[in-house]
Amino acid sequence: MRREVVSAQASRSASSRIATLLIVVVVVLVVRGGETIPADLAFGAG
């Protein structure tokens, strides 16, 4: 039971981290005017 709860919490925090990262990337792209989209995607993935 405890392991399931821990994994659930871990997945939730991971999802929130991913969502936050996506938001940050989108904001950066908008600020830059979308000139360096491939570079930003590669940076976010790596």
Image: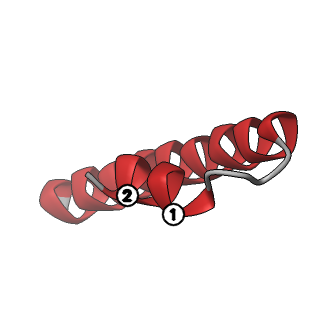
The residue carrying mark 2 is 42
Instruction: Pick the quarter of the image with the N terminus.
Output: bottom left
21 lies above or below 37: above
Front residue of 23 and 11: 23
x and y, in percent, of residue 45 in the image: 34, 58
Q: Residue at x 18, y 54 (%)?
A: 2
Rate crowding at label 2 as few (under 14), some (14 to 19) or many (20 or more) other CA atoms within 10 Å.
few
- What amino acid is at disc 1? Pro
Determine the CA span between mark 2 and mark 1: 6 Å
Q: Residue at x 72, y 36 (%)?
A: 28
x and y, in percent, of residue 6 in the image: 24, 50
In the rendered structure, the answer to whether residue 10 lies left or right of residue 35 reads: left
Mark linked to residue 20: none
The residue carrying mark 1 is 38
x and y, in percent, of residue 40 in the image: 51, 49
Q: Residue at x 61, y 51 (%)?
A: 36
Query: Marks 2 and 1: CB-CB under 8 Å?
Result: yes
